C-alpha cells in the first residue's frame, strides 16, 4: 500500500511540474512558422497514438468481458481465428495506413526545413536577413555579416520576417534551440549548419544549448528579441554606430581597467573585425542594454559585481575564471559603472 502511495504522489508531482515554465520557451506554444509546422506534426503523431491506444483498449476490454470465466462453461473453448486472412490483412493494413499518414507530412516538412540549397539561395537575396551564430563554452555570439558588426547573448530579429542562421561551434559541439520559434540544430566545430526561423509576435524568447557540453550546459542561455521592422532598422543603425559613453568618473576609471586587462578577451566595440577563433569572450558593446548577466542573472549592479568577484560561483567551468587577478572593491565598482554605461538605447 505504501508503495502505491509513493508512486501516486510522484505521479501527481510530475503532472503538476509539467505545467511549470514560461510561455516564451515552450514547443507547445509555437510563435513562428517553423515552430507551428513542427507543432502540427506533434499533434498528428499524438492523435495517431491516442487512436491506436483507444482501439486496443476497447478491444482488450471487450475480450475480457465477452470471454471471461463463467461458471458452468469451464470446458467451452471460444472459436479460434488463427489463419483468418481477413483479420491478418486488417491488422497489417491499418498500421501501414497510419504510418503513411504520419510519414508523408513528416518527410515533406523535414526536407523543406533542412533544404540547405534553398536556404543558400534565399541567403543571397538582397533583402535577406542573415545571422552567423557562433557557440562557445558557455555563451553565444551573433554576427550580422551584412551590417558587419557583432553582439552576444541577445539576438535581435524583425517580426514576421524569415531569418537565415549559419551555425558553428567554436570549441566543442553545442546545439541551438529556441523552443517557441524552431527545433534544435547542432553547432559543429568541423562544419557549418544552416536553418531558418521566423517569429509572429513581438517579444522576448528564451534560447538554450540542447547538447550537453560541460558543467554549465544548462546555464548556456540566450535571448531572441523580436521587434518591429522600424525598431529593428534603428537597432542595426545604433549598433553600427555604437560608442560607449563612460561619462562618470567611476565609469572612466573602469574603462581604464578594462583596457588594461579585459580587452585581451572581450571587445567593447560591435565593429570587431577579428576572426571568430580570436574572439575569446562575449562582445560587450551593448552590455548595459541586456536583460541578463552571463545569460543567467538579472542585469543589475549586484549581479555584475558578483560575476566579477567570482564568476566560477555563477557559471562553473567558464573560461573567464582565473584569467585576471584579484580585483579590489573600488576596481569592481569602477568596472561595474563602465559596463553599465555600454548602451545604445536612448
Image: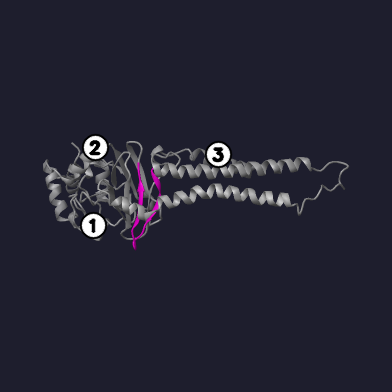
Which image quadrant for residue 23?
Answer: top left
Secondary structure of the residue carrying numbered label 1: loop
> How busy is the neighbourhood of tag 2: few (under 14 within 10 Å), some, or many (20 plus)?
some
State the separation of the CA atoms marked 3 and 1. 48 Å
> How busy is the neighbourhood of tag 1: few (under 14 within 10 Å), some, or many (20 plus)?
some
> How busy is the neighbourhood of tag 3: few (under 14 within 10 Å), some, or many (20 plus)?
few
**334 in the magenta segment:** no
* Residue 104 vs residue 231, the one in the foreground: 104
Among numbered discs 1 and 2, the one appearing first in the sequence: 2
Residue 4 falls left or right of residue 146: right
x then y, percent, for residue 46: 54, 43
**193 in the magenta segment:** yes
Q: Which residue is mark 3?
A: 12
Name the disc covering residue 256, or none: none
* Residue 340 vs residue 308, the one in the foreground: 340
Q: Which residue is mark 2?
A: 231
Characterize the magenta stretch by its predominant secondary structure: strand
State the separation of the CA atoms marked 3 and 2. 45 Å
Which image quadrant for residue 244?
Answer: top left
Secondary structure of the residue carrying numbered label 3: helix
Among numbered discs 3 and 2, the one appearing first in the sequence: 3
x then y, percent, for residue 116: 36, 55
Could you tell me which quadrant the C terminus lies in?
top left
x then y, percent, for residue 159: 31, 38
Q: Which residue is mark 1?
A: 279
Region in magenta: 181-198
Residue drawn at x 18%, y 47% as measured from the top left? 335
Any part of residue 293 in sight: no
x then y, percent, for residue 98: 59, 47
Amino acid at each position: 500500500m505504501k508503495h502505491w502511495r509513493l508512486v501516486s504522489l510522484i505521479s501527481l508531482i510530475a503532472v503538476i511540474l509539467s505545467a511549470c515554465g514560461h510561455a516564451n520557451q515552450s514547443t507547445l506554444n509555437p510563435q513562428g512558422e517553423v515552430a507551428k509546422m513542427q507543432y502540427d506534426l506533434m499533434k498528428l503523431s499524438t492523435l495517431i497514438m491516442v487512436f491506436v491506444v483507444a482501439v486496443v483498449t476497447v478491444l482488450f476490454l471487450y475480450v475480457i468481458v465477452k470471454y471471461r470465466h463463467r461458471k458452468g462453461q469451464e470446458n467451452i473453448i471460444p472459436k479460434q481465428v488463427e489463419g483468418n486472412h481477413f483479420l491478418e490483412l486488417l491488422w497489417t493494413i491499418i498500421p501501414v495506413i497510419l504510418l503513411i499518414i504520419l510519414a508523408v507530412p513528416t518527410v515533406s516538412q523535414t526536407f523543406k526545413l533542412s533544404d540547405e540549397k534553398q536556404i543558400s539561395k534565399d541567403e543571397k537575396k538582397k533583402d535577406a536577413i542573415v545571422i552567423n551564430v557562433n557557440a562557445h563554452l558557455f555563451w553565444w555570439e551573433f554576427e550580422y555579416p551584412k551590417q558587419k558588426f557583432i553582439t552576444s547573448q541577445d539576438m535581435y530579429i524583425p517580426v514576421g520576417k524569415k531569418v537565415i542562421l549559419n551555425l558553428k561551434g567554436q570549441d566543442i559541439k553545442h546545439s541551438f534551440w529556441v523552443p517557441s520559434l524552431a527545433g534544435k540544430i547542432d553547432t559543429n566545430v568541423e562544419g557549418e549548419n544552416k536553418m531558418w526561423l521566423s517569429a509572429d509576435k513581438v517579444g522576448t524568447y528564451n534560447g538554450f544549448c540542447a547538447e550537453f557540453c560541460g558543467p554549465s550546459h544548462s546555464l548556456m542561455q540566450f535571448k531572441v528579441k523580436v521587434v518591429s521592422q522600424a525598431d529593428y532598422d534603428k537597432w542595426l543603425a545604433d549598433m553600427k554606430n555604437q560608442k560607449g559613453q563612460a561619462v562618470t568618473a567611476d565609469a572612466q576609471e573602469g574603462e581604464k581597467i578594462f583596457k588594461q586587462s579585459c580587452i585581451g578577451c572581450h571587445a567593447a566595440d560591435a565593429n570587431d573585425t577579428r576572426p571568430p577563433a580570436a574572439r575569446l569572450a562575449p562582445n560587450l558593446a551593448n552590455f548595459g542594454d541586456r536583460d541578463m548577466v552571463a545569460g543567467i542573472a538579472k542585469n543589475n549592479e549586484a549581479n555584475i559585481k558578483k560575476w566579477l568577484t567570482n564568476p566560477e560561483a555563477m557559471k562553473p567551468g567558464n573560461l573567464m575564471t582565473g584569467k585576471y587577478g584579484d580585483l579590489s572593491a573600488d576596481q569592481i565598482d569602477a568596472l561595474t559603472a563602465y559596463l553599465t554605461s555600454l548602451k545604445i538605447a536612448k
